[in-house]
Amino acid sequence: MQRAQLKTMLIAVFCFTSLRTLNAQAGGSAPIKIGVVGPLTGRAKIYGEIHRRSIDLALKELNDKKPPGIAGRIIEPVFEDDGSDPQQSKDAVEKLAADHTVLAILGPVNSSCAWLDLEAAHRNHIPLIASLEPVS
């Protein structure tokens, strides 16, 4: 449960710090879209499923409160499968970055995908929050 609370806190902090951007988009009534990149298929599928359920739980908690979401706007995840493949993950980040309704991206889950994802996010000027554990 602490992981879900941490993700909720990170999403909330990020969104609150971006209120100027949020209010400028679509008159302040459209959902806030957050991209999510993770392995929904492939060798790390189990971690992608945990990642997806954690994000869904955190967003449900935020969206169910009154007013819902952030500043009355619900938060909508946009999931992209990276198949545990670095190139596919980079492509997913670039696809989400090309959608100007996506405010930021959460992911990747795999450290093997992180470097290319970070480069793609930086090149496309979109924030990317990765939840990786260091390799020991």
Image (cartoon, grey):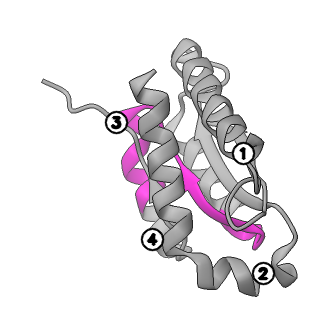
Q: Identity of the amino acid at label 4?
A: His
Tag 1: amino acid: Lys
The circle on residue 122 is 4
Place of residue 84 in the rendered image (x, y in percent of width and height, measured from the top left): 54, 28
Residue 127 sits inside the magenta stretch: no
- Most foreground residue, 56 or 63: 63
Residue 28 image position (x, y, % from top left): 81, 78
Element type at mark 1: loop
Closer to the chain start, of discs 2 and 3, is 2
The question of residue 105 being in magenta is answered with yes
Q: Position of residue 17 (x, y in %)?
A: 48, 73
Residue corresponding to mark 3: 132
Image location (x, y in percent) of residue 47: 51, 19
Residue 36 lies, with reference to residue 34, above or below; the image says above
Image mark for residue 65: 1
Residue type, mark 2 in image: Gln
The residue at 19%/27% (across/down) is 135
Q: Quadrant of residue 52?
A: top right
**Of labels 2 and 1, the one closer to you:** 1
Q: Which mark is residue 25?
A: 2
